[in-house]
Amino acid sequence: MTSPRRAPGAPGGPAAAAAAAAARGGGRGRPVPVPVPVPVPGAGLCPPPPRHCPRPRPLPVLLALAAAAAFLYAAWPPVGDPAGNAPPGGRRGRSEAELRELAAALEPRRLRETFLRPLLRPRVPGSAGSRAARQHLAARLGALSAGWRLELDAFEAATPRGPVAFASLVATAAPAAARRRLALACHYDSKALPPDARGRPFVGATDSALPCALLLELAAALDARLRHAARQGADTTLQLLFLDGEEAFGEWSASDSLYGARHLAARMAAAPHPPGGTQLGAISLLVLLDLLGAPEPTIYSHFARTHAWFLQLVAIEKRLHRLGLLRSHPREQMYFQPGPAPGPVEDDHVPFLQRGVPVLHLIPTPFPRVWHTPEDTEANLDPPTAENLGKILAVFVADFLRL
Ligand SMILES: [Zn+2]
């Protein structure tokens, strides 16, 4: 699945000035005023290929950059989104009983057997496996009661392998006319890799079958709450972006990667919603899930603009831990680390970020050990981690949407 690469340096739309500045400064969303990455604690932990890790720099430069980054990181407050949904706008202060109820809504067996397993097959764009995966996603959402509106962003694009048909699935919970959206995204395509020596195909369990299954599980776990919110005429609704063509067919480049995300971001930027705005502008926050499902992920905050929302994830993880609601979770803070990310990662969020969409990029650093190998299978997923992340995100989404 993912071939996340370095964050881009290209500036984008009007509200993207900060994002572009951040990208120039290493892609972590902090206005580091120099066009080089910030230091790399633990660079040796990064998986191959090493170009995914920031290049090491001479020590004095690193120290200066570290100091500048730390200062600016602390000094740059998060920017509230136009809908006022940035913290503390979301709901807070849930009771223990409410948290237990939300956590219990996550059904690990449904996540694994109903949502994940049908995705564990090659899903190369334009293939039969891709169509089957897409049909699975649509069917599962169609079986829910929250009134999901499904749209397909289908197109053909030139690739190093010739023209390929791509199709991203956009699902919007009722009321689709809601003024604002919280968008959760994953890529459902799998990387076109040959079978291994034993004939096993690459199925990309973390890359990104499990993240997509998690999106389905969140939709299912929050179904009744979403239905209720729709009846109340919610101002902000949930949108799921199942993106196609994240993976490069050849060597990762600006033109050979992120096919679905690039096409969809451009399309949404041109589609009116609500009156006077665009579908892209209606996204209060884009949360991109990638490479999740392996044990003990370490996820960093990549963008100062959304850092307050990231801190919500940190707080939710701690609170669920203290309530004993997370499985195989020995420390209260394991997944979400509030410090600066060790390096930029190019991924499906980039075309949206460049157009000014606030982004939370939930990707572990380092990448899973099995990344882009035949070992990226269900057997190497860590079920407690998947369940725990699902619980944390269920609370996060419920808080954001005030469900
Ligand atoms: Zn990949």
Image (spheres, helix red, strand yellow):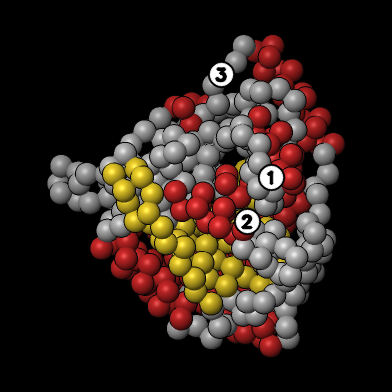
The percent position of residue 353, horizontal first and vertical second, equals 64, 46
Looking at the image, is mark 3 or mark 1 nearer the viewer?
Answer: 1
Residue 360 place in picture, x, y as percent:
64, 51
Q: Earlier in the sequence, mark 3 or mark 1?
A: 1
Q: Any mark on residue 13, and which?
A: 1
Which residue: 74% across, 46% down? 15
Q: Nearer the viewer, mark 2 or mark 3?
A: 2
Secondary structure under the numbered disc 2 in the rendered image:
helix
Residue at 59% of width from left, 76% of height from top? 173
Residues at circles 1 and 2 in contact by the CB criterion of under 8 Å: yes
- The residue tagged 2 is 269
Residue 389: in sight, yes or no?
A: no
Q: Is residue 281 left or right of residue 377?
A: right
The tag on residue 56 is 3
Image vertical order of residue 50 relative to residue 292, above or below: above
CA separation, marks 3 and 1?
Answer: 31 Å
Q: Nearer the viewer, residue 199 or 315?
A: 199
Q: Is mark 1 within 8 Å of ligand 1?
A: no
Residue displayed at 69% across by 82% down? 229
Residue 90 image offset from top left, x and y in percent: 77, 66
